[in-house]
Image: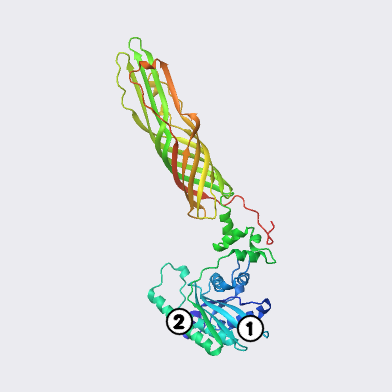
Amino acid sequence: MLPSLALASDDAFRIDAVFVSVFRSDDVEDEDRARAVERRLVELLAEQHLVVGVDEVEPFEDYSAETYLRACPLDRLAGCAYVIGERARADWAVDGYVTFLDEDKEAYRIESSIVDVARSRTVVTFEVQIDEGRGDTWASAVASMIDQLAAGGEPEDVRDRTDRTTELEDYRRGAVERAAIAEGLAALTAGLEQVDVRAQGAALRPTRVTAADLERLQQQESAPPWQRLGLTPAQYRRMRNRGMDADAFRDRLSGRAGRLLFRASLAGGLAPARMTYDGRWTVDPETQVVVGLEATNRIMQGSGFGGEVEVGIGLLSWIDVSLGLASRGGTHDWLVHAEATNRPREAPARTQVAASDLEGIARATLAPWPLGPVRPLASVGVSLWRGPSVGRMIDFSSVGPLEPPPVPTALRLRLGAGVEADLDRRIRLFGRVELLPQVGGLYEARQIMGDASQISDRDERHLRAGLGMIASAGLLVLTDPLWRRQKVRGDGRP
């Protein structure tokens, strides 16, 4: 029925929600009188608006909305009213600060702001001086001003919009505001001794917790809020200034600790992983005896591309350990060449083949600053590499005296650096580059028989393994923690 009533008359009840902040005073003993001014305004506003009381606002994790307003710095009253008004999903908010001017508390000064919550801005901030018996004049003028502002058009909640308002809408709204402010101030000026307009149309942002705020909270009699939440003062300040609730902040603060991690990535680069096999021998045609044989299986620098999967667990918020399995495909080559002592001949071209290697990896990853959306990475690990088998490329039963060499292996360090960015609460994109120095393993295997100098065309290539460098990019998925930090009680103790 409310929308129908709102259309019936300019004096009908409106569905615009108005939040009236806690009116404060410069003297604690005068706060009851200041709250009385607040209550009179609420009574007048309630005749035509839905008024949201401070006790109806959902509390924060460690304090109520009223506690927040009472702790608000005096130069940020409008910003604090905006924060609580937005939390209450109100369309308008009004704040007030009362200063009593005489011992009888009959004359006082009110500094007040009307806040357009949906558009995050003050409509007007003004100060008035009131003599005994004229408090209703001020409250009526403020209520009337909000009535006219609300009547100028349904509040457009830009919190749920992505498009910008048009210039025509902005101009119309500005005209309504100017008319409402002018009429309200005229009523105040006619009925009160002094009216001083401080500001109009100022943009508002949620107030930020400062070092001075932390010091003030530290000096209060009860345990400070960060102690009740089990946080440090710096962590509490960061949580508040980011607009996060305590549970979400603790979740981010815990980082990797106690979580299972799953990484999957694509990787490519240059590494000592290309296998090249060369087998040559010379036979005496009269005796059919091999007079010279030389066969070498070497690992040299080569490019490769593939993928890697990892599973791990977070030990601390900024460090995890994992086990991974990687495989990269690359090009390998081989040559088998036989000749007779009386008929030397040139070796044929080398045969190119594609094959994949396999590498098991143990790694520790350091990712500091878990609260940030982007963080650097550093990793250190060790891996056992296993190359492709020559026996899968060459049928050694058909190549006479040659014997299949052992599968090449390498023990490598993996020293990496990179970056990680949050895509979601549990999904992160990462990229890293790793250096792969070899510390052990079998990179070369040789078979020698007779006098190798009898081979007329020998392998004269100068091959080097070199230092590997692999770049990878992929996704990291985190589970919920397997264990959590101990909860703290309201007094800050476990």
Estimate the spatial distance between the alpha carbons at disc 1 and disc 2, rounded to whole Å. Answer: 31 Å
Provide residue 198's location: percent of width, then percent of height. 52, 79
Q: Is residue 319 above or below residue 455?
A: below
Q: Point out the image quarter for the C terminus.
A: bottom right
Nearer the observer, 400 or 387: 387
Tag in front: 1 or 2: 1
In the displayed structure image, the side of residue 492 where residue 402 appears, left or right: left
Where residue 195 sits, quadrant-wise, is: bottom right
Image: 425 above or below 46:
above
Q: Position of residue 383 (x, y in %)?
A: 51, 36
State the residue at coordinates (31%, 24%).
348
Percent x, y for residue 380?
53, 41
Question: Residue extending furthest top?
Answer: 286
**Amino acid type of disc 2?**
Arg
Amino acid marked by disc 1: Leu
Res 101 label: 1
Q: Give how far across and how far down residue 59 sits, in percent.
A: 61, 68
Q: Secondary structure at mark 2?
A: helix
Q: In the visual, does 394 lie left or right of 309? A: left
Foreground pick, 215 / 387: 215
Which residue lies under the disc numbered 2?
A: 178
Q: Secondary structure at mark 1?
A: loop
Q: Nearer the viewer, residue 364 or 487?
A: 364
Q: Residues within 10 Å of mark 1 (few under 14, many from 20)?
A: some
